Amino acid sequence: MKDRLMDFDEALERYEPVLGFEVHVELGTRTKMFSAAPNPAHPDHHDAAPNTLIDPLSLGLPGSLPVVNDEAIRYSISLGLALGCEIAESSRFARKNYYYPDTPKNYQISQYDEPIAFEGSVEVQLADGRLIDIPIERAHMEEDAGKLTHVGGATGRIQGAEYSLVDYNRAGVPLVEIVTKPIMGAEHSAPEIAKAYVAAVRDIVLSLGISEARMERGNLRCDANVSLRPRGQEKLGTRTETKNVNSMRSVERAVRYEIQRQAAILAAGGSIRQETRHWHEDTGTTSPGRPKSDADDYRYFPEPDLLPVQPSRELVEQLRAALPEQPAVRRRRLQADWGFTDLELQDVVNAGLLDTIEATVAAGATPAAARKWWTGELARVANERGVDASSLVTPEHVAELQRLVDEGTLTDRLARQALEGVVAGEGSPTEVAAARGLQVVSDEGALVAAVDEALAAQPDVLAKIQDGKVQAAGAVIGAVMKAMRGQADAARVREIVLERAAQS
């Protein structure tokens, strides 16, 4: 049955939204969290066949014992520090007990009341420039479950499926779950804040190099919690948790949808059920999952097979000193250095070209020229081929290409032809320009002769120019450029046209 929705603005007039997010980050270590089995979140193992990256622990076989992955601990501490968290002097693992076919031990090794990192915050920037602090309650380590594939039925979900297949490759993948505190005061910006927060976490994870953070692969997954409370009420409303939303745009849409859905129910005198909900990308809607369990339902107790994690202060400070510049701080610094508008910078960020343009500027191009080539001609070619622009040429190639333009060796038109050759693997811009004979014609005598010929062929245009109608020179310039196969400087051709017309 289709949900009734309230107009978004009306919903915000009557109710205050309260948000919360649980973001799961798969760590790209070589092996799993508690065993030596290969980790499918590592680039070397992306294409593994189902149930090939397994070992006795992944399958929950009797007698198998967990051993903590040191690299995963380091990654988790680095992420906690980047989130502004305190790092616990001692934290420990617990057993989260529940039965599901993709959890062969019938429990998940996680952290409960003693997480590795706690009490942090993440700054996000909205489209209007506002900076919002998102409070972080905790970031804890755990292992992932396996993956179920439901076969048959129309939706690919368990409802209506004929049977389900289990792939245990993902069982035991190292995860960090980042849990926010309740986020108040979001108001009409709630959907945008949701998107901006997930984007900020993804940027941090990528800057640390601890995960590919590709949402479509499940490297980064967001559970979005939404509740509403009537204006003026202190008590929080009942929340729903929309699970595993797999893109930033979908997080934004899911939060908006839940606000509208819950508002319609409350306004009609109904009550919100505490439950998980599934996001449907095709319809832009959520649907009920299972009743949402509280912590007590999982019967957490300390994991008896693992000692507490007690990182030395020296290790924590070593990892703190190695943290890269915060992505948001870096973007603001580069924008100021480059003189980009907010829109220009956002285009670069959205295209994933920030690092590439920084490298192009370092190679000698101006920021404006670097942005022009990467977001213009190279973006067009990349879109046609279905690849990333940065895979076509190097930043050094682009800087060299622009230098040839600045020196007057190539016009923009000739530079595009040279770039075409570089993309095709014909060599550097200089080599391609030489091989294809693309250099600008600088022989003044040849240019004057071409201009005289074009003027003689178009006496009516010559008369107009002599009458002061300078714009008519365009026809002559076009004829000269064609005769020169585009290898002339159009600005210089225009000067010669006007000079020769005046002398005639």
Image (cartoon, rainbow, N blue to C red):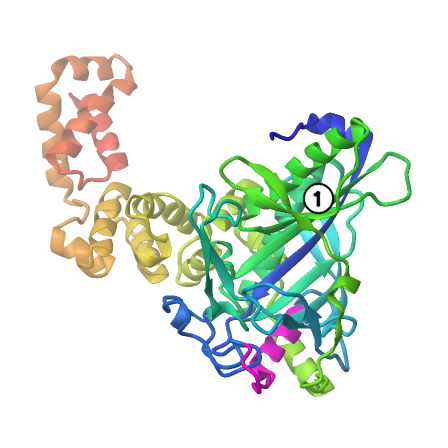
Q: How many marks?
A: 1
Residue sitting at 43 percent across and 62 percent down? 359
Helix, strand or loop status at disc 1: loop
Residue sitting at 85 percent across and 45 percent down? 236
Q: Is residue 406 visible?
A: yes
Range of magenta residues: 60-80
Q: Is residue 407 left or right of residue 118?
A: left
Most extreme residue toward the front is 162
Q: Is residue 306 left or right of residue 208?
A: right
**Dot 1 crowding, Cα within 10 Å, few <14, some 14–19, many 20+:** few
Query: Which image quarter is the C terminus in?
Result: top left
Place of residue 384 in the rendered image (x, y in percent of width and height, measured from the top left): 29, 43
Location of residue 410 with respect to 146 vertically, above or below: above
Residue sitting at 79 percent across and 44 percent down? 238
Place of residue 449 in the rendered image (x, y in percent of width and height, measured from the top left): 9, 33
Place of residue 44 in the rendered image (x, y in percent of width and height, measured from the top left): 39, 72
Q: Which residue is mark 1?
A: 130
Q: Is residue 389 left or right of residue 279?
A: left
- Residue type at mark 1 is Arg
- The quadrant in which residue 144 appears is bottom right
- The quadrant in which residue 47 appears is bottom left
Place of residue 42 in the rendered image (x, y in percent of width and height, measured from the top left): 45, 71
Give yes or no for residue 74 being in the magenta stretch.
Answer: yes
Give yes or no for residue 384 being in the magenta stretch.
Answer: no
Residue sitting at 79 percent across and 27 percent down? 267
- The quadrant in which residue 104 appears is bottom right
Query: Which image quarter is the N terminus in?
Result: top right
For the residue pair 348 and 214, the one nearer the viewer reads as 214
Q: Is residue 125 visible?
A: no
For the residue pair 14 and 330, the one nearer the viewer reads as 14
For the residue pair 316 and 170, the one nearer the viewer reads as 170
